[in-house]
């Protein structure tokens, strides 16, 4: 039953493209995790070696458990203040927003990955290492930490832009042309990292993935899809594709929850995203069973969004002279620039 529903979803070419593109990001992530961890440990050692008196004074630790809140961080101790300065010194966009809430500052002197999280998108606080990261986190690290300036930053940003378009697609669909262009940009980035052993394998797998049909064979059916036999590297099993799909949907749900947390009132764009994702899961019985808690959460968010709008309309009726100001507020919330979504 589950394979039959998966096969039905993959009959939509644009949805299949969406899942394929998501798997390309997984392959990219897997190829870069070890490299990112090694580079961050080296970066951390360099900082300590250059600034031992400021960043690692003997016998001095953060006793205040300095705790950031979102993008705000006013450290309570001089040690965390010094580390904050050093992080910003190596940030490629010093006037941009830093998600300090990702970090546990008291661990900066001893844990290189806590340092890395200052260059990443929100939602990384509980991520303990590169093996737990998604592609967006690693790509942003490469983009915003100048330790990685040897990598062509334009190529990194191109993949980030595509990743944003993919994860924020309301219908979870992309065209074949979009997928082809995305594949080229991923391969261009991988070429920048040919010295990383995992990259060669990833490049080959991405190429095969994009040219594969992803036909799902349903046991009991007489006609087996062409190419399933003897091409196991190209045609994965239905259960493997199902796992890939589930991982991508979970990442999309995480993205929705993080966007919602940042807004006091749901924007029309996010409410629409919630509704379409909920309806998609509702129409996919196999996914709905596995993601029941998420279904309930989406329904709660949808109801909250409707209640907010009802309250806003009632306020406008009661205070008509404020309607223009309220309308401006809503317009500002309708569309968040893509560069701020990560």
Image (cartoon, rainbow, N blue to C red):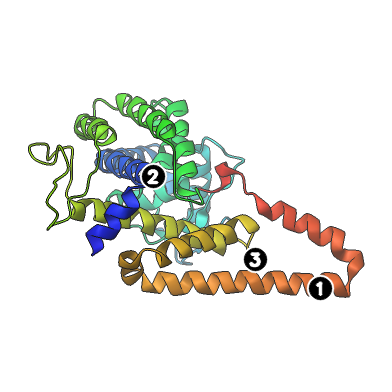
- The nearer-to-camera label among 1 and 2 is 2
Q: Position of residue 82 (x, y in %)?
A: 50, 49
What is the C-alpha distance between the residues marked 2 and 3?
30 Å
Tag of residue 248: none
Q: Position of residue 170 (x, y in %)?
A: 51, 51
Label 2 secondary element: helix
Q: Is residue 201 above or below residue 115?
A: above
Q: Residue furthest front?
A: 222
| Number of the front mark, 1 or 3 | 1
Relative to residue 171, is residue 317 depicted above or below?
below
Asked if residue 271 is positioned above or below residue 317 in the image, the reply reads: above
Q: Is residue 113 left or right of residue 157?
A: left
Task: Kindly indicate whether the residue at mark 3 contacts the one at mark 2 (C-beta within 8 angstroms).
Answer: no
Packing grade of label 1 (10 A; few <14, some 14-19, many >=20) is some
The quarter of the picture where residue 155 lies is top left
Considering the image in quadrants, where does the N terminus appear? bottom left
Q: Which residue is mark 2?
A: 18
Q: CA distance from mark 1 to mark 3?
A: 16 Å
Report x, y in % for residue 341. Answer: 54, 48
The residue indicated by pointer 3 is 264
Image location (x, y in percent) of residue 325: 84, 59
Q: Residue furthest left?
A: 230
Reading the image, the residue beneath label 1 is: 315
């Amino acid at each position: 039953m589950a394979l039959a529903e998966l096969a039905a979803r993959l009959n939509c070419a644009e949805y299949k493209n969406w899942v394929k593109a998501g798997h390309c990001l997984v392959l990219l992530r897997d190829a870069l995790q070890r490299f990112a961890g090694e580079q961050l440990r080296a970066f951390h050692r360099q900082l300590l070696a250059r600034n031992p008196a400021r960043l690692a004074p003997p016998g001095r630790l953060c006793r205040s458990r300095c705790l950031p809140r979102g993008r705000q961080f006013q450290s309570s101790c001089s040690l965390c203040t010094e580390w904050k300065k050093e992080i910003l010194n190596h940030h490629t966009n010093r006037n941009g927003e830093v998600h300090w809430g990702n970090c546990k500052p008291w661990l900066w002197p001893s844990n290189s990955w806590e340092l890395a999280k200052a260059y990443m998108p929100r939602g990384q606080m509980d991520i303990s290492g590169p093996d737990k990261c998604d592609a967006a986190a690693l790509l942003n690290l490469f983009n915003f930490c100048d330790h990685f300036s040897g990598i062509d930053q334009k190529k990194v940003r191109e993949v980030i832009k595509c990743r944003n378009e993919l994860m924020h697609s309301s219908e979870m669909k992309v065209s074949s042309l979009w997928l082809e262009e995305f594949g080229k940009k991923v391969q261009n980035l991988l070429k920048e990292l040919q010295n990383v052993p995992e990259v060669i394998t990833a490049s080959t797998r991405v190429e095969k993935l994009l040219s594969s049909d992803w036909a799902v064979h349903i046991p009991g059916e007489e006609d087996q899809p062409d190419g399933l036999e003897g091409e196991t590297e190209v045609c994965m099993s239905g259960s493997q594709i199902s796992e890939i799909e589930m991982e991508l949907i979970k990442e999309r749900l995480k993205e929705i929850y993080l966007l919602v947390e940042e807004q006091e009132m749901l924007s029309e764009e996010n409410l629409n995203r919630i509704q379409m994702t909920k309806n998609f899961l509702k129409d996919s019985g196999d996914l709905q069973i596995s993601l029941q808690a998420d279904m309930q959460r989406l329904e709660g968010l949808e109801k909250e969004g409707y209640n907010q709008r009802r309250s806003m309309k009632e306020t406008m009726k009661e205070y008509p002279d404020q309607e223009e100001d309220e309308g401006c507020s809503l317009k500002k919330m309708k569309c968040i620039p893509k560069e701020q979504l990560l």
